[in-house]
Amino acid sequence: MISSFVGFIPTAAALTTSPPPIIASLFSFSGTRPNNLGIQAGQLANCPDSPNCVSSQSTDAVHQIAPLVYEDSATEAFERLKMIIQNLDNAKIIREEQDYLYAEFTSAIMGFVDDVEFNLDEADQIINVRSASRLGESDLGVNRNRVETIRAVFQS
């Protein structure tokens, strides 16, 4: 009788990887893709009042984060950024344009989705960024940490 349940006991390796799709779909908190993403009047969307968003175009201390700064060509900088995003866990590029990149990041356990956007500003040699959770109030600093991780790799 016990031997029939052995196959159901997860190994340590299974606990550290993403759950099987059927399990992930049962516990998915992906929310709905926002309809305000993209560049509007030269700007990324404003952050909501909740603290689970950061933006380099925000002026308040809760949401403000520095843009990515580059010194090489705009094309090289944006290609480097794209490669960084493609190599990050749980990231999927949804939309890519010459000066705009939109990716979704999905948490491995509960399936929370964060929308992350980048906008190339060639005149100022910066890449503006906005990273926001779709659901919930607090993100425990996940969006800010993600942008700082991307920045660290981008500058190295």
Image (cartoon, grey):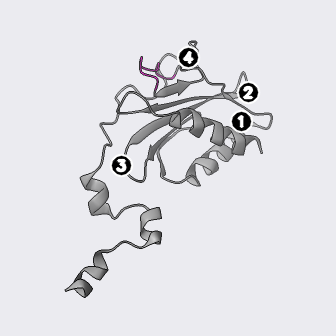
Q: Quadrant of the N terminus?
A: bottom left
Residue underneath mark 4: 58
Residue underneath mark 3: 110
**Which residue is nearer to you in this view: 98 or 109?**
109
Residue 22 position within the rendered picture, expressed as x and y whole percent measured from the top left: 26, 62
Q: Quadrant of the C terminus?
A: top right
The reply to whether callout 3 and callout 2 are in contact (CB within 8 Å) is no
The reply to whether callout 1 and callout 2 are in contact (CB within 8 Å) is yes
Is 60 displayed left or right of 133 in the figure?
right
Q: CA distance from mark 3 to mark 1?
A: 36 Å
Residue type marked 2: Gln
From this view, report whether residue 100 is shown above or below residue 47.
Answer: below
Q: CA distance from mark 1 to mark 2?
A: 7 Å
Residue under the point 75% across and 34% down: 70
How many numbered circles are shown? 4
- SS category of the residue bearing label 3: loop
Q: Earlier in the sequence, mark 1 or mark 2?
A: 1
* Residue bounds of the magenta highlight: 44-51
Residue 74's tag is 1
From this view, report whether residue 25 is shown above or below residue 50.
Answer: below
Q: Residue furthest right?
A: 71
Residue 54 position within the rendered picture, expressed as x and y whole percent measured from the top left: 53, 26
Q: Earlier in the sequence, mark 3 or mark 2?
A: 3
Residue under the point 58% across and 19% down: 57
Residue under the point 71% across and 22% down: 123
Residue type marked 3: Met
Residue underneath mark 2: 125
- SS category of the residue bearing label 1: helix
